Amino acid sequence: MTMRMTRRNLLAGGAALLSYSMLASSALSQEGRLRVLWWGSQARADRTNKVNQLFQSENQGVSINGEFLGWSDYWPRLATQVAGRNAPDVIQMDYRYIVEYARRGALAPLDDYLGSTLNVEDFDKVQIEGGSVDGKLYGISLGANSAAMMVNAVAFEEAGVDLPTPNTTWDDMARIGAEITKAGKRKGFYGIADGSGVEPLFENWLRQRGKALFTADGKIAYDANDAAEWFAMWTAMREAEACVPPDIQALDQYTVETSPLSLGKAAASYAHSNQFVAYQGVNKDKLALNNFPLIGKDAKGGHYRKPSMFFSVSAQTQDPELGAKYVNFFVKDPKAAEILGVERGVPESAAVREQLAPTLDELGRAMLDYVSGLGALAGALPPPPPSGAGEAEFALRTVAEQVGFGQLDAKQGGETLVNEVSQILSRG
């Protein structure tokens, strides 16, 4: 059979094709929706929402629904949404959880978008590897950071106490904390926050002792004696009133706003360097950044530079390429970089770092100098934490609180923690 193509056929076919194209375009524009979920402060939300608006303005037909929570509420919400097949399209992910979510099949591998939708060639290779699990890329780092102590410089000056230095030891810190409390310059004010339940602080202390939180094959890497010594150190600081009492520490929901530092209850607290901007935003007094104390004068620091957080694309999303496009925009677009600054850490892209360096304010420069100036205090990036690491973090927090309130002594706390973490990790 021969088909005869006439001008009328051609016009009719063209009209039909145009109509179909318009319908398809309309459908695509209607489907161009992304839900983005992140944890963080209001300051982070303000910056993220501005970038979302910018992305929408440059991608007509795409709408973004952003949601944010504090750290403690974030993970239960995400777990519930993933289990209910209602996961957000783009998920802010932490180094502690990326293995767990990737191996559960909750995240989409991004390897197919590298070099096309995702252009991260100028990222630090180590940071790219940090977002990879079992040979596949599941997270794009939003910045590099390191754990840090946030210090209220004004409160130290009022108490007549020198600021900690890179060589300050835990013994020094206990003395400093007690001196600030004893000075009594502020009502109900103590030297330092109780860090016994702060996992990065515990990890730093372990690394200085040549140990770690987890082995490379996903087992616990410290023993009950280590944990007991840790809890005993904090018990002594509580008794000396170097740190806040347990009822004040219990107010900390592990957000910037609820830390003893931000509540005006302590002159120092523990966080990550990228949170410096947010901490200063809610504290009237001038703050300073310092590394965690050393276990001894000759000890090497337990720090490392890590991806502050990732953006991952959900395996449940209807449009993984759009998710990847959004992530690339977030980490590479010059206008987005200008809005985001260094709030999520030092940008991984060399081009973005070069763009931002001359524009950084005092806070941004302090953060950049801290991360780049750790020197010998920073060691190698540990392997990604295993499945269950997030639950192990909550176990540390719970046991530390039990020790703080005297429900367990330090030895019992050490045994309880090791037993609980071992059981959590054994479930895989």
Image (cartoon, rainbow, N blue to C red):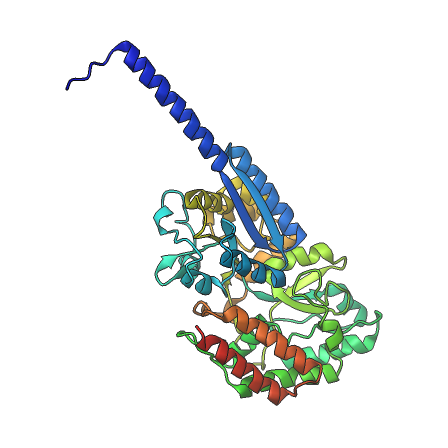
Residue 308 visible in rendering: no
Instruction: Indicate the quadrant where residue 57 lies.
Output: top right
Horizontal arrangement in the rendering, residue 1 relative to residue 422 (left or right): left
Please state which of residues 304 and 248 is positioned toward the viewer in this rendering. 248
Residue 299 at what x, y percent from top left? 54, 79
Residue 388 against residue 280 in the figure, above or below: below
Residue 366 at what x, y percent from top left? 62, 57
Residue 248 visible in rendering: yes
Farthest-out residue, front: 1
Residue 194 at what x, y percent from top left? 68, 75
Residue 170 against residue 255 in the figure, above or below: below
For image coordinates 56% across by 87% down, the residue present is: 415
Horizontal arrangement in the rendering, residue 1 relative to residue 156 (left or right): left
Farthest-out residue, left: 1
For image coordinates 50% across by 82% down, the residue present is: 222
Residue 93 against residue 175 in the figure, above or below: above
Please state which of residues 332 and 352 is positioned toward the viewer in this rendering. 332
